[in-house]
Amino acid sequence: ANYFPTNEPQAGDIVLSPTGTGKRGMIGHVGVLMDSSTIASNNSFGVYAGKFTKNYTLETWTKKYAKEQGMPVYYYRHK
């Protein structure tokens, strides 16, 4: 594997919040930590739908996925 889990996220890390499993396997939301706190991910709403945008911070991602929706938040780093 080219990625390993980390508990200390930094720029370039993958952020993953799996929501469960579906017919095609694990589903959820994935982002990339662009700097020390900004996350870019696919945007599903409004004028930016279908675009990869800077749309979260570590704080807002954790609030939405972990605190409000009860999903885990994982960070992975490329070796």
Image (tube, rainbow, N blue to C red):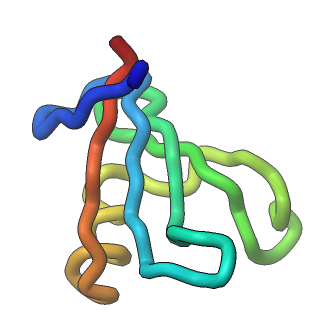
Q: Quadrant of the N terminus?
A: top left
- Above or below 28: residue 31: above
Horizontal and vertical percent position of residue 70: 25, 85
Horizontal and vertical percent position of residue 69: 33, 87
Please name the residue shown 83% across and 66% down the image.
49
- Above or below 35: residue 53: below
Residue 30 is left or right of residue 4, and the answer is right
Residue 7 is left or right of residue 38, and the answer is left
In terms of depth relative to the viewer, which is nearer, 78 or 42? 78
The tally of labels here is 0
Horizontal and vertical percent position of residue 31: 51, 47
Horizontal and vertical percent position of residue 5: 22, 36
Please name the residue shown 34% across and 12% down the image.
79
Residue 1 is left or right of residue 42, and the answer is left
- Above or below 61: residue 34: above
In terms of depth relative to the viewer, which is nearer, 28 or 26? 26
- Above or below 71: residue 74: above
Q: Quadrant of residue 44?
A: bottom right
Q: Quadrant of residue 4?
A: top left
In terms of depth relative to the viewer, which is nearer, 47 or 52? 52
Q: What is the residue that sits farthest to the top in this orientation?
A: 79
